[in-house]
Each structure stands twice: as structure tokens, then as C-alpha cells.
Image (spheres, rainbow, N blue to C red):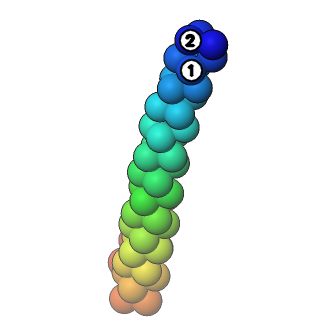
Amino acid sequence: MEKSQELIGILQAISIVAKSLAAKLMQIEKEVEAYEAAKAAAQERKAKKGWRQ
């Protein structure tokens, strides 16, 4: 019984960490998407002005 309780505690801790990491990964993905969109927009502006890329 004690081993089962210990394993349950470990699995709960792993679950909490996994949830936190998933949230961080989602935030990083949003930041990357925003960066890439801004980079693409800047390249479009340069292209319209006739700058070399």
C-alpha cells in the first residue's frame, strides 16, 4: 500500500511538471509565430521599396 501511495505521488508530480512544460511550449510557439509573421511583414515592406533581400 505504501508503495502504491508513493507511486501515485510521483505520477502526480510528473503530471504537474508536464502540464507546466506544455504551457511553456505553447507560449514559445506563439512567440515564434509572432516573430516569423513580423519577419515576413518586414521582408514584404522591403520588397515593396525595392530593397534586396
The amino acid sitting under disc 2 is: Glu
Q: Which mark is residue 24?
A: none
The amino acid sitting under disc 1 is: Gln
Residue 38 horizontal/vertical position (percent) = 39, 75
Q: Secondary structure at mark 2?
A: helix
Which quadrant holds the N terminus? Answer: top right
Q: Which residue is mark 1?
A: 5
Q: Which residue is mark 2?
A: 2
The answer to whether residue 43 is visible is no
For image coordinates 46% across by 65% down, the residue present is 30
Extreme front residue here? 1
Labels 2 and 1 touching (C-beta < 8 A): yes
Residue 13 vs residue 23, the one in the foreground: 13
Spatial CA distance of label 2 from label 1 is 5 Å
For image coordinates 56% across by 20% down, the residue present is 5
Residue 16 vs residue 37, the one in the foreground: 16
